[in-house]
DNA sequence: TTATCATATTCAAGGAATTGAATATGATTG
DNA sequence: CAATCATATTCAATTCCTTGAATATGATAA
């Protein structure tokens, strides 16, 4: 991206930066998992079916951009979205893109080891 | 981007593709100029202060993705947005990103040669 | 049919994003 | 403090995006 646009274009660079966070299927899936509140990394790992290190890489992108925050609790690190306005963007995108509803769980069921999933009844 | 994700992530690839159209300041500026209806390329050129060929490149990206359509009228080619749902996305992004209001015109005023600007009174 | 107008395309170089592999960190338990 | 747990980071290779430069196209008017 160019460093200096005209005054008409310049104000959109910040929007473009923000949107770049969302142009990745895994980051979209993560943010949508965080719609119902915070989740630990192992929860995301179990539900997305991806390597832990890879998920951490994507979490790092979102974290360094200030879109999510982490909170440590014992062994686990829980992430939550700090800019809830992003959910409005995601909702508008869902309206726009015809798609099969994303599966909330992996086929065959998810065996999530996280404390949240193993204390009360939850996803 | 990977070709095969898990069933949980896969449905988001289409959304991510759509969003990639929006991760460019010039394309965002173009789409916002098209919020009030169709405009010819020379109009965009005058208002964005960018080379014509460069604007055409960005129009090509949006056109090939089916986000805009062109209509020829004599010398001019007019573009309009074919998926108005994108404006809801743009609105949600505006809510989310603190920014100075984009200038509607370039400083010093715009000298737009397009027929639309030179027939009646308009921007 | 040639000149001119508005717009489109192609190409190539540089830069940025993606992702696998390997490994590091830092809290917790024994 | 050593082992183990969940999570984070670094690095490098590949792929994808951006953008300037040059040029092509296709409609119109003389």
Image (cartoon, coloured by chain):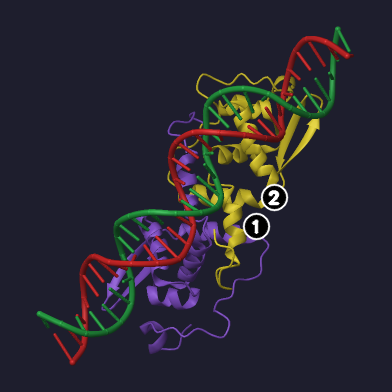
Chain colours: A yellow, B purple, C green, D red
Q: Which residue is mark 2?
A: A83
Q: In which quadrant of the rendered view does residue A81 lie?
A: top right
Q: Reply above or below: A93 against A33.
A: below
Residue B95, position as x, y percentages in the image = 64, 60
Q: Which residue is mark 1?
A: B96
Residue B122, position as x, y percentages in the image = 46, 84
Residue C18, position as x, y percentages in the image = 52, 39
Q: Residue at x 48, y 71 (%)?
A: B33
Residue B38 visible? The answer is no
Q: Reply above or below: A23 against B35.
A: above
Q: Is residue D4 left or right of residue D12?
A: right
Q: Is residue C19 left or right of residue B100?
A: left
Q: Residue at x 62, y 32 (%)?
A: A55
Q: Chain of mark 2?
A: A
Q: Residue at x 56, y 41 (%)?
A: A28
Q: Nearer the viewer, residue A52 or A73?
A: A52
Q: Reply above or below: A80 against A46.
A: below
Residue A13 visible? The answer is yes
Assign the N terminus of chain A to one quadrant of the image.
bottom right
Q: In which quadrant of the rendered view does residue A98 lie?
A: top left
Assign the C terminus of chain A to one quadrant of the image.
top right
Q: Residues within 10 Å of mark 2 (few under 14, many from 20)?
A: few
């Amino acid at each position: 991206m160019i460093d200096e646009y005209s005054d008409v274009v310049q104000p959109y660079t910040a929007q473009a930066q923000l949107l770049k966070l969302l142009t990745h299927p895994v980051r979209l899936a993560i943010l949508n998992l965080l719609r119902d509140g915070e989740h630990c990394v192992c929860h995301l790992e179990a539900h997305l079916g991806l390597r832990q290190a890879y998920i951490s890489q994507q979490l790092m992108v979102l974290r360094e951009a200030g879109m999510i925050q982490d909170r440590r609790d014992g062994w686990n690190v829980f992430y939550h979205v700090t800019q809830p306005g992003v959910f409005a963007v995601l909702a508008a995108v869902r309206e726009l893109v015809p798609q099969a509803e994303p599966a909330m769980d992996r086929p065959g069921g998810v065996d999530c080891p996280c404390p949240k999933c193993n204390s009360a009844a939850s996803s």
